[in-house]
Amino acid sequence: MYSELFKWLFMSRLKEMKEVKSCPRQYVLAVNDTLNVISGKWKLPIIASLLYGKNRFKDLQENIDRITPRMLSKELKELELNGVVERKVYQTRPVRIEYELTESGKSILSVMDAMIEWGLDHRAKVVGT
């Protein structure tokens, strides 16, 4: 049962990807959608930090060099609005707030892995190391 469902989902997704790749307008739109969510200097480092699990605000700030509290707060709100990050408030004293990636946010790992691979290859070609 699961294999049939997986096969159907995979084939549907494959068909959708072929359609997008065959149309420059849809292709550019999909790229713009992605960039709108992850654009900026701080969003990918925030996502990368959250890939290791839930974090409190202070933990994120410590993990990401040179990010100001104001900028971290702004970027977290944008990531939350885009459905990439979930903010959980615990009714404790003092109030505890944690941030974690949504399923959509976790799925960006393959994009980040591809970016890292490309970056390493590119550096080797340009710098020659």
Image (cartoon, grey):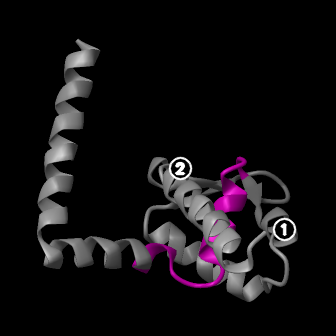
Label 1: how many Cα within 10 Å (few below 14, some 14–19, many 20+): few
From what the image shows, is residue 84 above or below residue 77? above
For disc 1, the marked residue is 58
Expressed as whole percent of the image width and height from the top left, the position of residue 13 reads 21, 45
Left or right of residue 52, residue 100 in this image = left
Task: Estimate the spatial distance between the alpha carbons at disc 2 and disc 1, rounded to whole Å.
Answer: 21 Å
Horizontal side, residue 118 vs residue 31: left or right: right
| Helix, strand or loop for disc 1 | helix
Label annotation for residue 78: none
Q: Amino acid at mark 1?
A: Lys
What is the span of residues highlighted in magenta in the rendered image? 36-54
Q: Is 104 situated left or right of 10 in this image?
A: right
Mark 2, secondary structure of its residue: helix
Q: Residue at x 78, y 69 (%)?
A: 129
The answer, for residue 56, to whether it is visible in the render is yes
Mark 2 or 1, nearer chain start: 1
Q: Quadrant of residue 119?
A: bottom right
- Residue 106 circle label: 2
* Residue 70: percent from left, percent from top: 73, 87
Question: Where in the figure is residue 87, as x and y percent of width and height?
Answer: 60, 60
Report which quarter residue 88 is drawn in: bottom right
At x 84%, y 68%, the residue is 58
27 vs 89: above or below: below
Which residue sits at x=84%, y=55%? 93
